[in-house]
Image (cartoon, rainbow, N blue to C red):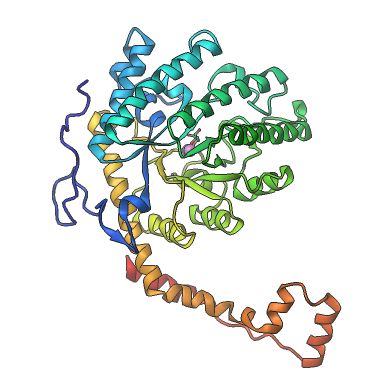
Amino acid sequence: MNFYATKDPIKYEGPSSTNALAYRWYNPTQKVMGKTMAEHLRFAVCYWHTLCWPGTDPFGGETFNRQWHHAADPMEAARMKADVMFETLRLLGVDYFTFHDLDIAPEGNSLKEFNSNVTAIANIFESKMAKSGRKLLWGTANMFSNRRFMAGAATNPDADVFAYCAAQVKHCLDVTHGLGGENYVMWGGREGYETLLNTNIGQELKQAGRFLSLVVEYKHKIGFKGPILIEPKPKEPTKHQYDYDTASIYGLLKSYGLENDVKLNLEQNHAILAGHTFEHEIALASALGIFGSLDINRGDYLLGWDTDQFAMNIPEVALTMYEILKAGGFTTGGMNFDAKIRRQSIDPDDLLHAHVGSMDASARGLLIAAKMIEDGKISKAVDARYAKWNEPQNMAMLAGKESLDEIATRVHKSGLEPQPKSGRQEYLEGILNSYI
Ligand code: XLS
Ligand code: NI
Ligand code: NI
């Protein structure tokens, strides 16, 4: 199927290239701090924004007019999309892809029919993956589009919906496992509520915990090695969401006893909707031991919704990459382009420009972050701020070896008087800019 005007794989041509469809910074085999760029960045193309969204917005219909949205047979459309996904990966030189079950195959008239459609397309993936060496970063179940999920999926007041979701996730996890998927994602788009007048929060949280435990138990049962990843988002479509941000999910995982089995898939636009920076969410998840993977994109700071734009802002991406490197890099995770082109970008090749631009921004961000780490000025300043915690007395205090009254006695005896020191923020911002 002829979709893109571009026919040859996009290549690295270096910073001086004037070819708009070339990589200037992303050089997959270039080594940075001991690993290749491809190993660091682990890019993935997502199905939903790239192939499924037709360019609609709440005020207007489709703008893209993709062939598959007008195919008479929905399975024929599904096969077309699979072809275009693998063509996209080939042209971009990206190793991974991601999908919702509903992105890849039509629902049909029953769950049974849906499952068999999903399996049929997964079989196509299997042979395309074997031929091309492409891989699945993660799969996920869409439990928010169909009207049966309007009041939630696992947290639906109706127990029938909970059971239906269990059956849907079981199949999607089986398919993800069968394709060698490296993670399994759960984004709870409607796991929340609109009004307390019709909602029992305590009951819904119990359901969320049980559902997550069921998925974790099943993952172990079938020997799925990758982590289950929860993707936090504070709102949209549901007004109040239980999976608000890193901190709230950590609290829920602790209360369910699942903090060792479940990690997070963090997204830039979701972080800023929650009133955080992306790097805050990554640093916090890493400090709590639940960092997993990233949905890389960019929100609009002037708009209050999930615009899911391609990440192009180099200083911002550099701070993201700095946190990733500090966290030790990805293990099973990667950088999934949960990003969509604007609805006026109607040429197929706009999809290539978007990915290339964002991959280049990520590569530059990685190079800047590596400089930040290798130069060490920033981490030295941070270490200096905390230096007193390395003194034996203070280590003992932190380790719980002194009680409150013992500490008080010591303070009075020594006449301790804390001496404020500069936080040096502007100095550090200047250092950061010197790397960019
Ligand atoms: C929506 C989410 C979604 C997840 C996968 O806002 O980002 O796309 O990544 O269900
Ligand atoms: Ni996402
Ligand atoms: Ni999003």
Nearest to the observer: residue 61 or residue 347: 347
Q: Is residue 401 visible?
A: yes
Residue 57: give x, y in percent of width and height: 42, 26
Give the residue at x 31% y 55%.
36
Identity of the residue drawn at 84% across and 85% down = 409
Outermost residue, right side:
405
Location of the C terminus by quadrant is bottom left
Residues 86 and 127: in front is 127
In the picture shown, does residue 176 fall above or below 424?
above
Give coordinates of residue 266: x percent, y percent: 51, 46
Residue 315: % across, % down: 37, 59
Provide residue 111's location: percent of width, then percent of height: 55, 13
* Residue 351 visible, this orientation: no
Quick check: 167 left or right of 117? right
Relative to 372, does residue 258 appear above or below in the rendering?
above
In the image, 380 versus 422, the foreground residue is 380
In this picture, residue 365 sits left or right of residue 114: left
Residue occupying image coordinates x 54% and y 42%: 227
Q: Where, by quadrant of the figure, is residue 84 drawn?
A: top left
